[in-house]
Image (spheres, helix red, strand yellow):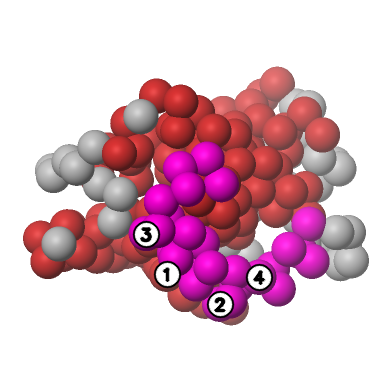
Amino acid sequence: MIIQSKTALQLVLCLVGILWLSEIVDYLITIDLDQFGIFPRRLDNLWGITVWAFLHGGFLHLIANTVPLAVMGFFVALRGAKTFLLVSLMITLLAGLGVWIFGRPAYHIGASGLVFGYFGFLLGIAWYEKSVKAIFIAALTLFLYGGIVWGVLPNDQFVSWEGHLAGLMAGLFSAKLMAKTKLTYQQDVI
């Protein structure tokens, strides 16, 4: 369990480090990297679904995403490195595609789609798996971050509620898929 927790912490710190490095580079160079986020229904911007979670509208935006991403990401990473990487990739791409198809015409950036995805995954996997550990982590997640569900409603023109909703849906879908494939039960180490 200690090795698994150490690996989970390393994975999450690596992800958070990449997000912070990306924002530092964005701050230091003259090119605004946020233009590489998702702009819905533009074919020349379709590839933005691969990087949108790594771009932020400034350090305050990144700070707001860092703690919930680290906490829920850690909970997901406790399931193993393969599961963490696969779930993170599925959420990023599926939520990004959802935003690209259904989002309003604006640039959509930020790790909050991934945050909502982890939230959905943790709740969903508890529903499908019904193990004591998964239910405990889901209950803890709800206690700590249950209020984020209001973020799927349009209430601020500068917040991508579409990204939040798409992330939540992608997380729930990922939980269903992982529960069916049983990959989420495996203990894996990098």
**Could you say which quadrant of the image residue 169 lies in?**
top right
Query: Disc 1 on helix, strand or loop?
Result: helix
Separation (CA) of disc 4 from disc 2: 6 Å
Answer with left or right where residue 43 lies relative to residue 175.
Answer: right
Numbered disc in front, either 3 or 4? 3
Image quadrant holding the N terminus, namely bottom left
Q: Which residue is mark 4?
A: 146
Q: Which residues are magenta?
A: 127-152
Mark 3 in CB contact with mark 4 (< 8 angstroms): no
Q: Residue furthest top?
A: 43
Mark 1 in CB contact with mark 2 (< 8 angstroms): yes
The residue under the point 32% across, 31% down is 183
Query: Disc 2 on helix, strand or loop?
Result: helix
Q: Is residue 148 found inside the magenta-colored segment of the image?
A: yes
Q: Is residue 67 above or below residue 76?
A: below
| Secondary structure predominantly adopted by residues drawn in magenta | helix
Q: Is residue 48 visible?
A: no
**Could you say which quadrant of the image residue 102 lies in?**
top right
Q: Which residue is mark 1?
A: 71
